[in-house]
Image (spheres, rainbow, N blue to C red):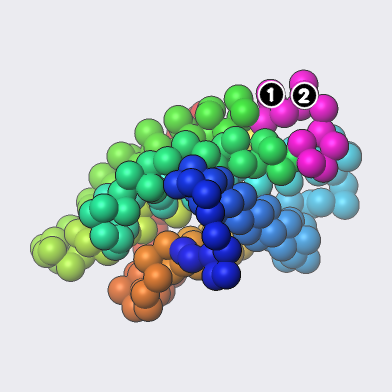
Amino acid sequence: MTADKLEFESFEQMAATTAAALVQAAAHYAFQLYCDKGFRRRVDFDNLDKVEQDRVFNELVVTHVVLVILILEAPDLRVPREFRDYLLLLQEMIPKAHVENLRTLGLEDEHLQQWEKLIALRYDEYAKDRHEVRSAAMEIQSSEKPLDLKNLSKIQMLIPVQAVAIGCHHHICRGNTNGRDDLFKLTLDPLTKFYVDIRGRLEGVKITPLTRARQALKHMIYPKRKGK
């Protein structure tokens, strides 16, 4: 990701500016999904009270923010080796950048602290869930044909977005996901578009393999979360 025509006094200042841009993109994508008519119809939005509507929006936002963090630490992210230290710094700055963005919107310190805790909680949860997603995806793929390097690479590439989509669906539904596959699909597709967008910005190249992998999502079966 580049910042054209901007000059930075330090490595940290450049990372802070980039982090701010990433969390703003996350909030933008989350808001688009929140306003989507199909999404609202499937969450029965008009029959939710204001507190529950806000909770759904917050889950969408934190999901997109955590997905940015998972992208930054993805081992298959195609960036120069010397760029990795910058990504680690950027990863650390993402939660702070989101909180600072909320501060500029007038959120009180009490709520900012709650956001810090929510981001940490969802990150721990979704980072852990990546292992379950990887195992499930490998089991599904190997049941159809022997796994090769290409399939393993595709599975690895899709893990972050699958993990957060499954978790987000679970939390929006308060764990009652039975019969709500349409809502999952409506959540997964915009998340995948966001995922492709952010990876493309970071890698700075055409991401044909990722675009193809995105298409594969439509033909895969996703593990359901058990009673969390």
Q: Is residue 41 left or right of residue 218?
A: right
Identify whether 58 is placed above or below 195: above
> x, y (%) of residue 121?
53, 28
Q: Which segment is the magenta one?
A: 103-115
Can see residue 199?
no
Can see residue 61?
yes
Q: Residue at x 18, y 68 (%)?
A: 150
Amino acid type, label 2? Asp
Q: Main secondary structure of the magenta part?
A: helix
Residue 51 sits in quarter: top right
Q: Residue at x 38, y 33 (%)?
A: 128
Q: Is residue 144 left or right of residue 71?
A: left
Q: Are marks 1 and 2 in contact (CB under 8 Å)?
A: yes
Q: Would residue 158 be counted in the magenta stretch?
A: no
Q: Would residue 107 be counted in the magenta stretch?
A: yes
Residue 182 sits in quarter: bottom right
Report crowding for label 2: few under 14, some 14 to 19, many 20 or more residues within 10 A (C-alpha): few
Q: Is residue 155 left or right of residue 59?
A: left
> x, y (%) of residue 207?
36, 74
Q: Which residue is mark 2?
A: 109
Q: Which residue is mark 1?
A: 113
Q: Residue at x 40, y 70 (%)?
A: 204
Amino acid type, label 1? Gln
Mark 1 to mark 2 CA distance (whole Å) = 6 Å
Viewer-nearest residue: 111 or 180: 111
